[in-house]
Image (cartoon, rainbow, N blue to C red):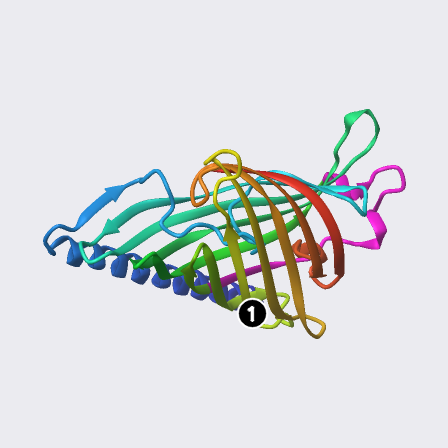
Amino acid sequence: MERQKLLNCSKSFSKNRSNSIIMRNILYVIFSFILFVNLKAQTEITFFPGTLNIQPFTANMPEPKSGTQFDLNNNELKLNIGNSLDIININCPEGNSYSFGADFFTFTLLRSETSFHFPVDAVDYLFGVNAGYKKNYDNREYGLRFRLSHISAHFADGHYDGVHSVWRNGQNPKVYSREFFEFMPYYRFNDVRLYAGLTYLFHVDPPTVGKVICQLGFDYFGGGLISKYLHPFIGADFKMVDINAVRINNTFNTGVKFGYAHGKGISVYYTYYNGYNFHGEYFNLDSDYSAIGFNLDL
């Protein structure tokens, strides 16, 4: 027994040490790059700029959201609270821009009950760092976003049936977490942005989940309607995942945004989702829903 404890401690120490080495190397690369570009003439470095260098991908699920969705099929709603922040933005005279920042999100599943009660069923947490590159030329743009992130999922007290002392629907809490790299190159022309994504899960629990996720998608923000601050938009995302079997998760969004098309504002939208459930505690179950939502693009 003591030997097993020592082995477990050794494995935990090795994993933590490996993660620390990865983070240290990433920080070293970031600061070395900042030092390099700072030596170039006319390079502008801004700390904590007001907008993101790479705007969130409209129909991609794990993006910064501060708002809610009301499910049209079930007695459920989603409350999302999170933000991405560019800590450093580097603009070069030839039209290239670079950024480094951080992500902190929560994605929460609730139920609606009488007397204005909304029990919290499940919560997913995401945090990590990101880096972006883009280049503008002739009213076109191409770029790449990189993220190193952690996601963990948990049931909350609203999932527990206190009257019968059981977890709702026979769904007991399970361990679900993952650490991953995400690469998202894109190309924008005529306000249409096309992107392709590759995500690699270098650690995941349970280990039976596939480690590679591929995706394709697009989004479009139109010109001002009535006002220069009112923009119709549409987006779709198709993500190939391997859990019980390989399948495509489909997401479709359309709505109107009041504010800046590629910046801050308020969005009201319709969304449709079909695929494996986004919430980690339900990761191996199917999900199919339509919802009306609003979002504060901070």
Please tell me which residue is depicted at 40% across the width and 61% down the height of the picture.
146
To which quarter of the image does residue 283 belong? bottom right
Residue 161's place in the image compared with 287, above or below, is: above
Please tell me which residue is depicted at 45% across the width and 54% down the height of the picture.
191
Judge whether residue 56 can be spotted in this image.
yes
Left or right, residue 153 beside residue 191:
right
- Crowding at dot 1, Cα within 10 Å, few <14 / some 14-19 / many 20+, comes out as some
Judge whether residue 1 can be spotted in this image.
no
Q: Which type of secondary structure does the marked residue at label 1 adopt?
A: strand
Q: Indicate whether residue 155 is drawn in magenta.
A: no
Q: Mark 1 points at which residue?
A: 213
Please tell me which residue is depicted at 78% across the width and 35% down the height of the picture.
112
Residue 143 coordinates in the image, percent (x, y)? 36, 61
Which contiguous range is marked in magenta?
157-181
Residue 46 coordinates in the image, percent (x, y)? 24, 43
Q: Residue placed farthest to the right in the image?
A: 164
Q: What residue type is labelled 1?
A: Ile
Residue 128 coordinates in the image, percent (x, y)? 44, 52
Q: Residue placed farthest to the front in the image?
A: 226
To which quarter of the image does residue 269 belong? top right
Q: Indicate whether residue 158 is drawn in magenta.
A: yes
